[in-house]
Amino acid sequence: MNQGPSESSVSPYHDPSHVDPLKEVYHEAIVDNPERQELLVEGHTALLCIDIQYLDAARGHGVFRDAENSGVPLEAQEYYFDRLERLVLPNVRRLQDAFRARQLEVIHTRIQSLTRDGRDRSKGHRRLGLLAAPGSRDAEFIEMVAPDETRDEIVINKTASGVFSSTNLHYVLNNMGIESLMVVGVYTNECVETTVRDACDLGYLVTVVEDCCATVTPELHEASLATLCDRYARVARLSDVLKTIRTALPSEAAVETANG
């Protein structure tokens, strides 16, 4: 099956001056693998939205409740929230809408403990003081990109960076026949990167949508993507991903219009 034009587009995270003896092998297996398009057409691709919640993606909430003492410099916070509000949240919503229009799975992860006092949290989250108790504001999703309850979208709760290592997501995806993932969310260099690496190791074909992800500095964002690109995932921009989806799977509305 022929691939859409974006499947072989050159990623901005390639360094042409870097000599990589495995570049061609990985590019063929990870980026140009024709299974990507086939899995999309056959409905075996899901959108995985990572941790876009009040705990870590809203001004004045969660880890940013006390902005001065959050550990993140105010300048970095301003960059992060500007990117989220101006670019990432609207882009994630556009991608969610594209998946929903084609009856593809949209899955959401969030940091949320099983208990109100968080005694079930991972040691890592306890050390960091991360707690989003059930029913708390911090555990709520940002409204613009929240699960669509009318579509019964799956929500996976976790208390670690990697969703695969700490939940039954792999089991759930296997049950639904999902073999390919498009990944968006925060932070690029933490929960997103950990999840992408694990997903690749488990055999999923992964696409990271670059302008649907964010972290607290552009350097951290770029470094993570450079590491993931063509080794663990295809890194693409939303415009290319949407073009691929529209080419492979016209929406129900588009099909109706074409059929008159």
Image: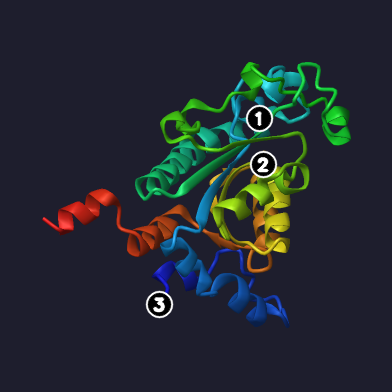
Query: Disc 2 marks which amino acid?
Result: Tyr
- The quadrant where residue 250 appears: bottom left
In depth, the one of 175 and 60 nearer the eye is 175
Q: Nearer the viewer, mark 2 or mark 3?
A: 3
Tags 1 and 2 touching, CB below 8 Å: yes
Q: In the displayed structure, would residue 50 be above or below residue 6?
A: above
**Residue at the spot x=88%, y=30% of the render?**
127
Query: Disc 1 marks which amino acid?
Result: Asp
**Residue at the spot x=51%, y=57% of the render?**
45
Residue 36 in the image: x percent, y percent?
A: 51, 67
Q: Which mark is residue 56?
A: 1
Does any portion of residue 60 appear in the rendered image? Answer: no
Query: Disc 3 marks which amino acid?
Result: Asn
Q: Which mark is residue 5?
A: none
Q: Which residue is mark 3?
A: 2
**Residue at the spot x=69%, y=18% of the render?**
65
First along the sequence among labels 2 and 3: 3
Q: In the displayed structure, would residue 16 be above or below residue 155?
A: below
First along the sequence among labels 1 and 2: 1
- Per the model, the C-alpha gap separating discs 2 and 3 is 34 Å
Q: State the SS at label 2.
A: loop
Q: Which residue is mark 2?
A: 187
First along the sequence among labels 3 and 1: 3
- The quadrant where residue 121 appears: top right
